[in-house]
Image (cartoon, rainbow, N blue to C red):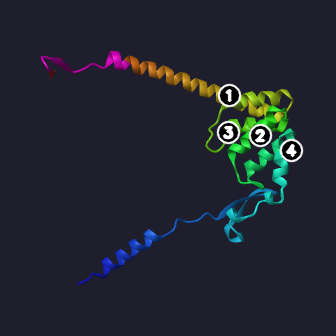
């Protein structure tokens, strides 16, 4: 005789295994107007199927211009960061932003300093590199960069003191392993002896 409890329990387990995780209420959309969160029910097409502006040649022209003009390299880096007209790509964003910064573009230098301060995608923060770029920008009179520079210096000092603390702790631990902890067994006459 089949028990109804077991049938209901089995059906419940099968249904729960097929259940989808809850979806987010919003979807992040980036376009020429910037990035924004849009309610999922207002979406007419998925972001992956949205055609990018690159199809009309604008991005190719911007890439060519970015080779010569730091402002265009900054814009291109920003577009890659936002996914505006191109696929979002942190590596390309950083590459173009750095190209603009190395050629003296003030906003690119500040943006690059901020990227190194906070980190970007898989790239973790690098307070030393952030300090380098923000020092240049702050030296050019940018007050926002001056505030960010203070954060970068504090983060670098914290990172350095953390590194020194780890080195100190490793030295103590090494000393303990060699002097404080002792062996209990002794090898004698071809075998181990324990007290």
**Residue 128: mark in rendering:** 1
Sequence-first tag of 4 and 3: 4
Labels in figure, total:
4
Name the side, left or right, on which 108 lies relative to 5. right
Sequence-first tag of 3 and 2: 2
Sequence-first tag of 2 and 4: 4
Label 1 sits on a secondary structure element that is helix
Residue at the spot 83% in from the left edge and 26% down from the top edge: 139
Name the residue tied to disc 2.
Answer: 97
Q: Is residue 194 shown to the viewer in this render?
A: no
Label 2 sits on a secondary structure element that is helix
What span is in magenta?
176-190
Residue at the spot 33% in from the left edge and 15% down from the top edge: 179
Q: In which image quadrant can residue 5 be found?
A: bottom left
Q: In which image quadrant can residue 123 be found?
A: top right
Give the x, y percent position of residue 193: 15, 21
Residue at the spot 75% in from the left edge and 54% down from the top edge: 86
Sequence-first tag of 3 and 1: 3
Separation of disc 2 and disc 4 at Cα?
A: 14 Å
Compare residues 156 and 70 and report the one nearer the observer.
70
Sequence-first tag of 2 and 1: 2
Give the x, y percent position of residue 43: 71, 69
Name the residue tied to disc 4.
Answer: 65
Separation of disc 2 and disc 1 at Cα?
A: 18 Å
**Local crowd at mark 1 within 10 Å, few (<14), some, or many (≥20)?**
some
Give the x, y percent position of residue 32: 81, 57
Separation of disc 1 and disc 4 at Cα?
A: 31 Å
1 lies above or below 142: below
């Amino acid at each position: 005789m089949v028990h109804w409890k077991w049938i209901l329990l089995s059906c419940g387990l099968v249904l729960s295994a097929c259940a989808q995780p809850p979806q987010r209420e919003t979807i992040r959309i980036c376009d020429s107007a910037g990035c924004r969160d849009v309610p999922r029910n207002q979406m007419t097409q998925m972001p992956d199927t949205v055609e990018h502006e690159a199809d009309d040649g604008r991005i190719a022209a911007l890439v060519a211009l970015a080779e010569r003009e730091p402002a265009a390299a900054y814009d291109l880096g920003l577009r890659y960061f936002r996914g505006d007209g191109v696929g979002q790509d942190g590596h390309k964003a950083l590459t173009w932003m750095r190209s603009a910064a190395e050629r003296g573009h003030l906003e690119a230098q500040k943006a690059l300093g901020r990227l190194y301060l906070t980190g970007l995608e898989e790239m973790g923060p690098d307070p030393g590199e952030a300090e380098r770029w923000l020092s240049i920008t702050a030296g050019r009179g940018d007050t926002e960069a001056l505030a960010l520079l203070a954060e970068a210096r504090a983060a670098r000092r914290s990172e350095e003191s953390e590194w020194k603390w780890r080195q100190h702790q490793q030295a103590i631990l090494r000393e303990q392993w060699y002097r404080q902890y002792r062996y209990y067994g002794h090898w004698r006459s071809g075998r181990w002896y324990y007290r």
